[in-house]
Image (tube, rainbow, N blue to C red):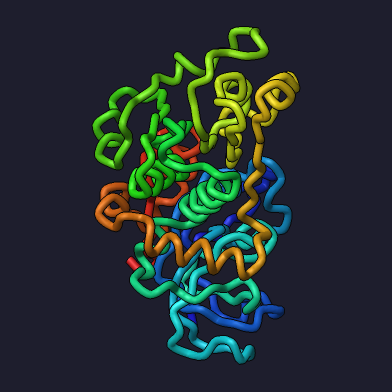
Amino acid sequence: MGFKALLIEKNDDGKAVAGVADLNEAQLPAEGDVTVAVEYSTVNYKDGLCINGIGGLVRNFPHVPGIDFAGTVEASSDDRYKPGDKVVLTGWRVGEVWWGGYAQKAKVKADWLVPLPAGLTTRQAMAVGTAGFTSMLAVMALEAQGLQPRQGDVLVTGAAGGVGSVATAILSKLGYDVAAVTGRPEQADYLTGLGAKSIVARGDIDTPSGKPLEKEQWAGCVDAVGGAMLANVLTQMKYGASVAAVGLAGGNKLDTTVIPFLLRGVNLLGIDSVMQPYENRNSAWQRIASDLPMDKLDAMIQSATLSDLPGLGRDILKGQVKGRVVVDVNA
């Protein structure tokens, strides 16, 4: 049976070119044990890299990108899933080395799926996607380090992006005073609507002073930017505070000193969402269903179709996508 997908192929010049194509089920990966009728996907920074053939993430062509999807099981050779089950997939390098969610059908390993949590629709799950899942992992990591609302403001960098938007909404719901960093002043109302208590201009925080320590300001931080901003934020953390590092939109180099770690006991926590074991994934998704306000989630969403993806892939790499994009693969 045929279906539509966003297919990346290489042209005669060796450049990756993406477009909507008609495929058939025989073209799906043979190794998968669960076939899913995909309902929704989303757009993450990594998707932008894959769509545009940047970073060497996609090495085999033709290829179907899309690192997230949610839908309904059509067929399964694994006892954990049966036809009709609603499922979510994020990570496991699906959409990079394995055909992904920018298609009306996907065939994957059962180990990579989690059941759709009660209280979430497949559309809401993809409004969350890898970005929101990563945000929840970051919040859980900060909580594991002892973070509590009474300790002070929690900084969220890249706050108008996908990870930052969800982190802002979750932290606010949990009672934290969120200081949201953005380089787009026009997004201030959007961020306060998500629950941010204060707005911090990117220019005020992304240029290191050269000092190993600055005034203690932040009880915790979810950092989606990396680079110079992360280096500067580390100098401003309160004693014993933690930073959950989840992204590198500002660069993958970290020019810092060990002084914040040695003199203030600051913790830098690396957050990986790709290879998280099932138990952690399921716990995070259950927390998302309970701790992410659905009205705030709805405010983040813009809708898209498969044909919109090449343009969105370019836009997200330029920092021009606000909140979360939900892709209706059947529209």
Q: The C terminus lies in which quarter of the figure?
A: bottom left
Q: From the viewer's perspective, is residue 304 above or below residue 227?
A: below
- The residue at 57%/28% (across/down) is 250
Q: From the viewer's perspective, is residue 121 above or below residue 204?
A: below
Q: Nearer the viewer, residue 190 or 192?
A: 192
In the picture as drawn, the residue positioned furthest to the top comes out as 210
- The residue at 43%/87% (across/down) is 84
- The residue at 39%/29% (across/down) is 179
Residue 297 image position (x, y, % from top left): 32, 53
Q: Nearer the viewer, residue 257 or 26?
A: 257
Q: Residue 251 falls in which quadrant of the image?
A: top right
Q: Nearer the viewer, residue 301 or 192?
A: 192
In the picture as drawn, the residue positioned furthest to the front comes out as 150
Residue 44 image position (x, y, % from top left): 50, 48
Q: Is residue 47 visible?
A: no
- The residue at 29%/58% (across/down) is 294
Q: From the viewer's perspective, is residue 116 above or below residue 68?
A: below
Residue 42 falls left or right of residue 175 = right
Q: Nearer the viewer, residue 91 or 264?
A: 264
Residue 148 image position (x, y, % from top left): 46, 42
Residue 292 image position (x, y, % from top left): 36, 55
Residue 293 falls left or right of residue 152 = left
Q: Residue 193 falls in which quadrant of the image?
A: top left
How many marks the image carries: the answer is: 0
Q: Is residue 274 visible?
A: yes
